[in-house]
Amino acid sequence: MHETRKPSYWAVLPAKVRYDNGLRPNAKLLYAEITALAGAQGYCWASNEHLARLFSITARTVSALLGTLAEKGYVGIEIVRDAKTNEVTERRIWIDTNPLAEEQTPMENIFHRGIEKNFVTPMEENFQENNRKNLSNTPLKSPQR
C-alpha cells in the first residue's frame, strides 16, 4: 500500500502533548512520528506493523498507544472502507488540528478577549509618516579614491 513512503526529516511535538503526564513516553514519540508521516495529505497512512518496526515495539503496543492518543483527543482515527464489500481499505490517523484549543497561550488569551483593538506595539507607537518633502532624486555619487 503506502508503506514505501518516507517520513519527513522533522516532527512536531506540541507542549500540550509533551508535558501530558498521562501519556507514556512512547506515546509522545509515536505522536511525533505521526506528525512526520502526515505530510501533505494531513494524515498518517502507516499501519501498526510499520510503526512497530520503526521503534522496535510490538504492533499491539502501537495499538494501545494510539488508543491513548485518540482517547485524549490528540489524534483522530478514520477507517476507510470499500463501498461494495465494506472491507477496510485504509486507516488514516489525523493530527489534532488545534492542539491549543483548551489551553491557550497568554497572548492568545489577550487576542481572544478583544483587547487586540487597544493593543499597540512599540513599532506602531513610534511610527511616523514618511516625509517625502525631504527626499531628492539626486543620484548617488560614486566613492572617490
Image (tube, grey):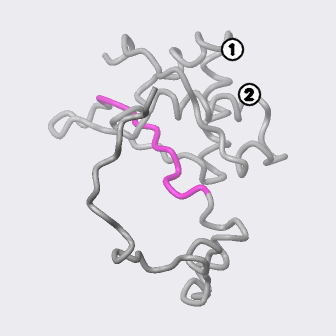
Q: Quadrant of residue 104?
A: bottom right
The magenta stretch spans residue 117: no
Report x, y in % for residue 34: 53, 31
The magenta span reads 89-99
Looking at the rendered image, the disc whose residue lies closer to the viewer, 2 or 1, is 2
Q: Amino acid at mark 1?
A: Ile
- Element type where label 1 sits in the image: loop
Q: Residue at x 64, y 22 (%)?
A: 60
- Element type where label 2 sits in the image: helix
Q: Amino acid at mark 2?
A: Asn
Q: Residue furthest front?
A: 145
**Picture disc at residue 57:** 1
Which circle's residue, 2 or 1, is located before the other in the chain? 2
144 relative to 114, above or below: above
Q: Is residue 21 left or right of residue 18?
A: right
Q: Residue furthest left?
A: 84
**Picture disc at residue 5:** none
Query: Depth check: 126 or 136 in front?
Result: 136
Residue linked to disc 2 = 26
